[in-house]
Amino acid sequence: MTDWHLLSGSEPDPARDAGHPDPPERVGFFTDTSVCIGCKACEVACKEWNAIPEDGMPLSGMSYDNTQGLGASTWRHVAFIEQKVPAPEGRTELSLIEGAPAAPEPPQAPGDMRWLMSSDVCKHCTHAACLDVCPTGSLFRTEFGTVVVQEDICNGCGYCVPACPYGVIEQRPHDGRAFKCTMCYDRLGAGQEPACAKACPTQSIQFGPLDELRERAALRVDQLQEQGMERAHLYGHDPQDGVGGDGAFFLLLDKPEVYGLPPDPVVTTRDLPAMWRHAGTAALSLAGGIALAFALAGRTKDPR
């Protein structure tokens, strides 16, 4: 079970907490959506390397998005979002037209159309609810700090599906077993980067030590904001958030909801320790009450 007291202290080491005595540096993904071109090379590379079955090619009506979300047979999903360019914070489109003094001009004028494209993936949470609720040990924490499903151990109970605050993990309909991104655990063990990051032509998907990626991402946000993209921000990078920080975090150009991401995710098993403590206290109180009742009943029947 997760040690929730760690959320208020120093950043936990999930691999060491999972029992790996001398783990390597924790690694992860940084996805810079500002340079994603929607080529889907990551989707293809993921499927090819991991031998993931095809999940159909229906026309979803959502632009070039045929998969619509992550699932048991879609471990990387490229979202295509078309929207009008918003005005900088605190200013209306009218004030821009009238030439009011402002920050540097954005790359596109407010009102123009733009694409927001983003390659989504399992977040490999520091505090992973899917791992907490798995009754068979199918889900485990690797020495790299990632979370992996062992498909040969999964019994298809499905507990992990509602536990995930991001809606990432899913069961395959033909056998009920759960699947999700493994961050190419087999490639990591051989000293290689995951297939999706290797295939990305724009370096939108960056792989490496998590601390190093966070520093690089912070610099990138500052750069974009200086260029007038005031809404650029990081998502899932904070070790003090509701999941203890993600092993896969993102640079977004709009609110998380626009990308189909929860604005303030909280690991669903956060309150389990307290719930078990309350249940245990209630059970002890009940047992004590029953014992006292029997003791009093025996005393009233004593002829002495």
Image (cartoon, grey):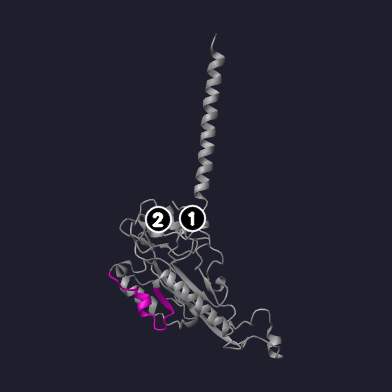
- Is residue 212 toward the left or the right of residue 111 in the image? left
Q: Are marks 1 and 2 in contact (CB under 8 Å)?
A: yes
Quickly name the residue at label 2.
17
Note whether residue 189 is visible: yes
Residue closest to the eye, 221 or 115:
221
Q: Mark 1 = which residue?
A: 6
- Amino acid identity at mark 1: Leu
Q: Position of residue 198 (x, y in %)?
A: 35, 78
Residue 73, above or below 114: above
Q: Nearer the viewer, residue 298 or 193?
A: 193
Q: Quadrant of the C terminus?
A: top right
Relative horizontal placement of residue 162, taking residue 185 as reference (left or right): right
- Considering every residue shown, the one lying at the far left of the view is 190
* Horizontal and vertical percent position of residue 168: 45, 65
| Residue situated in front as seen by the camera: 160 or 226 | 226
Q: Which mark is residue 106?
A: none
- Of the residues shown, which amino acid type is indicated by label 2? Asp
State which region is magenta.
190-207
Label 1 Cα crowd, 10 Å radius (few <14 / some 14-19 / many 20+):
few
Q: Quadrant of residue 27?
A: bottom left
Expressed as whole percent of the image width and height from the top left, the position of residue 38 reads 45, 81
Q: At 46% from the left edge and 52% from the top edge, which residue is drawn?
A: 3
